Amino acid sequence: MNGAESLIHTLVAGEVDTCFANPGTSEMHFVSALDRVEGVKCVLGLSEIVVTGCADGYGRMRGRPAATLLHCGPGFTNGIANIHNARRALTPMLNIVGDHATYHRVFDAPLTSDLEGFAKSASHWVRSSVAASTVGADCAAAIKAANTAPGQIATLILPADTAWGEGGEVGLVQAAPTRRLVDEPTVAAVAAQIKVGGPTIFVLFGQALSEAGLVAANRVAHISGAKLKTNAQVSRMARGRGRVPVDRIPYSIDSALKVFEGVKNIILVGAKAPTAFFAYPNKPSLIAPKGSQTSVLARQDEDSIAALNALADFLGAPVNVPIPVDTRKPEILSGPFDPEAFALTFAALLPENAIVCEDAVTSGRALFAPTFNAAPNDWLQNTGGAIGFAFPCATGAAVASPGRKVVCLQADGAGMYSLQSLWTQVREQLDIVNVVFANSVYKILYGELLAVGAEPGRASNELFDLSRPHLDWVSLATGMGMESVSVNTLDAFADVFKSACNRRGPFLIEFKI
């Protein structure tokens, strides 16, 4: 077999059965090998930011990597924004990047670049194959790296001659190491810190936001009186009725500082120390108040669920603790868009066991608390801050979870980065309802302008305005074969959203706000 064939055989052996692709000339032997080797489903994306965003959504839902197929340095860098988001989300991902033949690089052809340098800037693990005979082993090592806790970005560079060369061998895929257990002294030290007294906040992320992680955290909160919080953006969180309601730390630095005011103990569980999203003049970078103590119960590569249960046992918590119930009843409201009114309406309408991919930016600031009492769901957000996330993440999540309804909440400015995702959704007939919040402005930037001490003016109004020309989302969706409707009231949204959720297939709702 040639190197490309050995690569695909190794992917299949390593249970990497889905590849999101935007191939070029250097990847033609990989594409050709797909005709001869069964077991890998390929999904075409019309830009690399779509491809990598799809792999992010897939990896978050499956807990194991999809492959991406990218073309040389420019293709990789076109997709790097959503690789960055995936890295921040702790998503397992395997990038396969075609490159010039090894002997062709010295001639500095137009697509020649420092691909390995680009890859190292965004990946945990990078390797460039040197011969067809090593491709299978290289791929096996990449799969192991991607599956290593808490989830890593692995990038395998495949020069064209290593793909077409003969002598390929299937790689032996070894199991990734299991998550490390937190040792008893760490648990005892955190318990001692809590017993000293003072208001305590546990900051949860990653594995700790799974249903089992939240149940364990609830035991700790019950016995200690501590509050549970998570970051402003979550990678994947079990939410809705019957799940432990945990609110986010606010995005706004001033609001975040108020949440932590007077707190003495901050315990990190799979999370990093709470930090302002940006630096602002005369405001701190770290959210922790002066005089507080920050400790780590479990690092991101450690078993957060086991650590929380061990701490609960150490503190003497009951095994079964009632889950707090949000008494606010979701209801369908009427009138124009309002963030909290939309959140309550959305909570009343969300289907059972849905997956929500949310990049609503300013329109989504009020979404979390009012949706505690929605139907059980998994909630995915933009953890890296690079916009162009939700459309492709929803696409990949739908490929990973074909039996579940996916709802994508997407701001209009951010959606323009990756609207080609809609084409892939139609091509694959994925069960996704896309909701675009169309305020025709980069509204978040007006807030950021004020936060750094500046004032809006002629230039900012020009740079933040999206209304000249008007973005017609119904026309954009229709142009890619997707059914779509525009609404401007909550009651109209409710009617269309209910109808869209009662049928299968992709749909787009433009909510003019």
Image (cartoon, grey):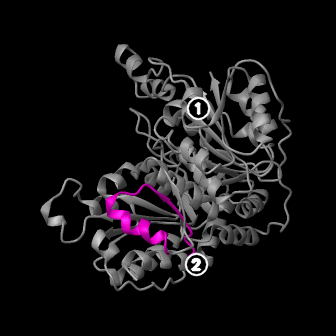
Nearer to us: label 1 or label 2: 1
Q: Is residue 270 above or below residue 250?
A: below
Image quadrant where one finds the N terminus: bottom left
Q: CA distance from mark 1 to mark 2?
A: 46 Å
Q: Along the horizontal axis of the image, is 215 left or right of 452?
A: right
State the mark number for residue 178: 2
Q: Is disc 2 placed on a helix, strand or loop?
A: loop
Residue 49: x percent and y percent? 44, 48
Residue at 25% over, 64% down? 100
State the mark number for residue 399: none
Residue at 74% over, 27% down? 493
Q: Is residue 487 above or below residue 416?
A: above
Q: Along the horizontal axis of the image, is 186 left or right of 503?
A: left
Q: Which residue type does callout 1 highlight?
A: Thr
Q: Which residue type does callout 2 highlight?
A: Thr
Q: Which residue is mark 1?
A: 478
Residue 34: x percent and y percent? 48, 69
Depth check: give the residue in front, 380 or 316.
380
Q: Is disc 1 placed on a helix, strand or loop?
A: helix
Residue 112: x percent and y percent? 22, 58
Sequence-earlier tag: 1 or 2: 2
Residue 126: x percent and y percent? 36, 69
Q: Along the horizontal axis of the image, is 347 left or right of 228?
A: right
Residue at 45% over, 84% down? 171
Count all numbered tags in the image, as a single digit. 2
- Residue 32 magenta: yes
Residue pushed farthest top? 458
Magenta-tinted stretch: 14-36
Which quadrant of the view contains residue 456?
A: top left
